């Protein structure tokens, strides 16, 4: 194995394996994998969903530790934070680590996201489809000129707003803003599938804050069925966080986004 020195801690990968935080992350990660396996069994499913470990608010050194524990998919919800961390551990992307963008995305940040992310889970409007597609075109052009390898198309999921409460009646929290109305999903899917540089993969949602996730995830599964009927490659369902991963697995989630239960509490929600 190649010995990589961590530029922050000065530790090598081997040191990391003995580091206490790495051990803690490894234990927490194993517990989450056991929960997922139990949920898969309980649901009678054949395939285990992919785990995207949400590293927001935690340092790049933790991303490196998670990589040493076998994690290959990490998620972030803010471009500025994600961009910085991805740059700090750029060697891991070369070694197979993928960055998933899972938060509200401003169109003017698309040009940054195409540099480091493999997947955007939160496509929720036509203007963002356009922004991502033209950012991909420019990014590929930049790479071509720089003699760098082309990147794969951007995998895109449509974030669906499953909350039927009026905006003013929603408690603050993850996913309380953003997401396309269920009625807009099929038109957005068509737009992504026709956009140069983008690859439609499926749908994503956050369970409405303070409500039972079961009916919400059932609705997401129905919407996914309609999307994949029209676009056969678009079968991904990104759903399930630390609190509701079992319900998400029962509703067919293919990608779980877990932060707290792997990394511990964050200083703030976001
Ligand atoms: C933070 C976040 C998660 C992870 O939530 P946890 O409760 O910490 O597991 C998942 N999805 C999105 C969109 C997030 O912003």
Image: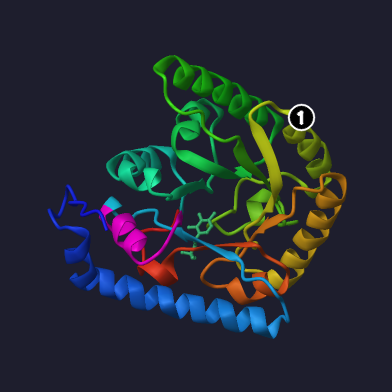
Q: Nearer the viewer, residue 155 or 68?
A: 68
Main SS, magenta region, reads helix
Residue appearing at x 72%, y 34% in the figure: 192
Q: Residue furthest left?
A: 10
Q: Which residues are magenta?
A: 61-73
Depicted 267 relative to depicted 99: above or below:
below
Q: Residues within 10 Å of mark 1 (few under 14, many from 20)?
A: some
Q: Nearer the viewer, residue 239 or 91?
A: 91
Residue 26 can be seen, yes or no = yes
Q: Is residue 163 left or right of residue 153?
A: right
Q: Nearer the viewer, residue 58 or 253?
A: 253
Q: How many marks?
A: 1
**Residue 151: x %, y % from top left:** 52, 32
Q: Residue furthest front?
A: 1
**Residue 248: x %, y % from top left:** 66, 69
Look at mark 1 in the image and give the residue it sits on.
194
What sort of colour scheme is used for the picture?
rainbow
Q: Quadrant of residue 41?
A: bottom right
Residue appearing at x 53%, y 49% in the figure: 102
**Residue 49: x %, y % from top left:** 61, 66
Depicted 155 relative to depicted 265: above or below:
above
Q: Residue furthest top?
A: 145
**Residue 196: x %, y % from top left:** 68, 26
Residue 267 can be seen, yes or no = no
């Amino acid at each position: 194995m190649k010995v990589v020195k961590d530029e922050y801690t000065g530790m090598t990968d081997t040191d990391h394996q003995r580091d206490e935080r790495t051990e803690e992350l490894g234990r927490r990660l194993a517990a989450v994998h056991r929960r997922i396996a139990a949920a898969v069994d309980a649901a009678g499913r054949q395939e285990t969903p992919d785990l995207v470990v949400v590293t927001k608010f935690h340092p790049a050194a933790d991303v490196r530790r998670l990589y040493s524990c076998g994690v290959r998919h990490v998620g972030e919800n803010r471009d500025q934070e994600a961009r910085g961390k991805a740059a700090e551990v750029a060697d891991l992307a070369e070694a197979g680590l993928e960055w998933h963008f899972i938060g509200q995305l401003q169109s003017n940040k698309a040009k940054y996201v195409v540099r480091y992310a493999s997947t955007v889970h939160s496509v929720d409007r036509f203007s963002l489809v356009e922004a991502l597609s033209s950012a991909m075109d420019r990014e590929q052009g930049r790479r071509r000129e720089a003699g760098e390898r082309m990147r794969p198309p951007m995998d895109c999921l449509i974030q669906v707003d499953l909350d039927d409460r009026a905006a003013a009646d929603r408690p603050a929290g993850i996913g309380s803003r953003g997401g396309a109305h269920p009625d807009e999903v099929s038109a957005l899917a068509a737009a992504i599938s026709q956009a140069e540089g983008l690859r439609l993969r499926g749908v994503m949602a956050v369970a409405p804050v303070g409500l039972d996730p079961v009916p919400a995830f059932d609705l997401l599964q129905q919407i996914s069925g309609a999307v994949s009927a029209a676009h056969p490659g678009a079968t991904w369902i990104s759903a399930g966080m630390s609190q509701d991963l079992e319900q998400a697995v029962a509703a067919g989630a293919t990608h779980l986004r877990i932060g707290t239960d792997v990394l511990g509490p964050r200083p703030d929600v976001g």
